[in-house]
Amino acid sequence: MDLAHWLGRALADHNEWAHSHGGRVTHPATGVLEHDLEDAYSELARRLGGSYPFFHPRYAGQMLKPPHDVAVLGYLAAMLVNPNNHALDGGPATTALEEESVAQLGAMFGFEAPLGHLTSSGTIANLEALFVARESHPDRAVAFSSEAHYTHARMCRLLGIETRIVPVDVAGRMDASALREILTDGSVGTVVATAGTTGLGAVDPVHDIVVAAHSAGARVHVDAAYGGFFRLLCDHPSGLLEDPRPWHAISLCDSVVVDPHKHGLQPYGCGAVLFADREASRFFHHDSRWTYYSSRQTHLGEISLECSRSGASAAALWLTLKMFPLTADGLGAVLAAGRRAALRWADMLAASEFYDLYQRPELDIVTYIPRTEERRISAIDRASQQVFDRAAADAVDPIFLSMLQVDSRDVCKLMPDVREDKPQMRLLRSALMKPEFESYVPRLHRKLESIASGVS
Ligand SMILES: *Cc1c(COP(=O)(O)O)cnc(C)c1O
């Protein structure tokens, strides 16, 4: 798609719409001189050049990539108006787009008529789910695994909720039998299962968790901020995901969070939370003396903790879902390519003389360890840092990776010949979120092998 053409079209359509309302009125107070802008903008462009090239597969690090051009178009077209989806008073057109998009997210998870809305981020979406957890069971704790996103502990502290940390198995998934044990005393009100942990992309056994929790009278919230859109692939005939059961079981849970700004091709500022029971809206009850006047319909601000929220986010997501519907062949095809790349690279790493594969990827996050002569945690930790630094420092063909800190005990369980001389160790981690990795992985691997061969 020709983005320049479509951005021009969005600007023209906006101007035509503005014209129908009498055209833009200017005031000298907001005027700028082209000459000043030239200088300021040139500086901005130069400074943005200091960014990491997230768009390119040589960026094989954190969960970062640019939005799809379609999302840029949807966002810009709406941003020129700058609707606020807090209330129908602020965003009548984009509120409808948000509701349609959220309904599609709900259908993906198998939620019938959920209560839901977009949020500024996964953190805020999870905060709302934890808030509802507290209001549902004011005197009971929230349980999540030791691999859950760090914001759960933080938000529970903010909300004054007690927490229980559930241990994980060697693959980083919540240990369901440990959870059953924790649930026996009835002190837990809500269990947070993670479908795609941030570190390893591990998928908790949601199917076991939901049975254990519901039979103990506890609710289940699924944090699928990262992994949620893999739901599209769980019934794929090629068996791209090993176990469909956790994904199917999300439909039985009480709430779920997914981040369209991670795997949904969106720019930042787009998370989503959905509650299976529309009655959850009672916890959000409040009055606003300023808004909610334009319509008697529910305003999104009446069912969310945030006030102002970008209507442009909803427009961007809505347009993206038109082009990439929530099916295995739609948006699913984008995730499938990254998943295949992860499987392929994992095989190459497992066969490499310079690296060990740390965990077989469950989704599209690959974790690996430089093989050092000295079989000590501290030596591997140092080698990881060296590969990380040298890969990024290459002047011609840099590669940008990320690292993950893990417990040395977990490493020694998987690699018994390694001596534990330090409690924690860093290893290398690549989130293969772009379909382009599918063809780029061999090149990435060769390059990283040549870097590792120079590291001791
Ligand atoms: C990224 C992530 C979050 C936090 O989401 P933000 O959008 O970064 O605020 C929460 N949980 C999981 C599992 C994540 O991967």
Image (cartoon, rainbow, N blue to C red):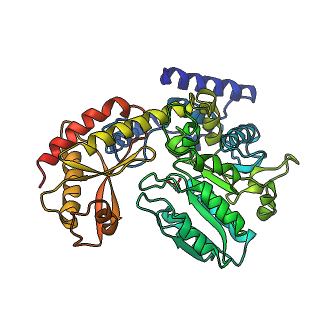
Left or right? Give the position of 281 relative to 151: right
Image quarter for residue 7? top right
> Which is more toward the observer, 87 or 192?
192
**Quadrant hosting residue 215:** bottom right
Give whichever of 57, 313 is nearer the camera.
57
Where is 125 relative to 33, above or below?
Answer: below
Image coords of residue 57 (percent x, y)? 34, 36
Say if residue 10 shows up in the picture: yes
Q: Nearer the viewer, residue 409 or 77?
A: 409
Residue 334 on image: x %, y %: 49, 32
Q: Name the foreground residue: 161 vs 97.
A: 161
Residue at image x 41%, y 54%? 200
Residue 180 position (above or below residue 370): below
At a point 48% along the width and 23% down the height, the residue shown is 4
| 45 to 389, vertically: above or below | above
Q: Is 376 left or right of 294, judged from the image as shown?
A: left
Residue 118 visible here: no
Q: Residue 160: x and y, percent? A: 63, 77
Q: Quadrant of the C terminus?
A: bottom left
Q: Quadrant of residue 10?
A: top right
Residue in the picture at 69% in, 60% down: 305
Instruction: Report the number of discs.
Output: 0
What residue sits 64% from the left and 51% below the top? 250
Location of residue 134 in the rendering, given as x and y in whole percent from the top left corner: 69, 71
Give the side of residue 166 with respect to residue 384, left or right. Answer: right
- Which residue is farthest right? 296
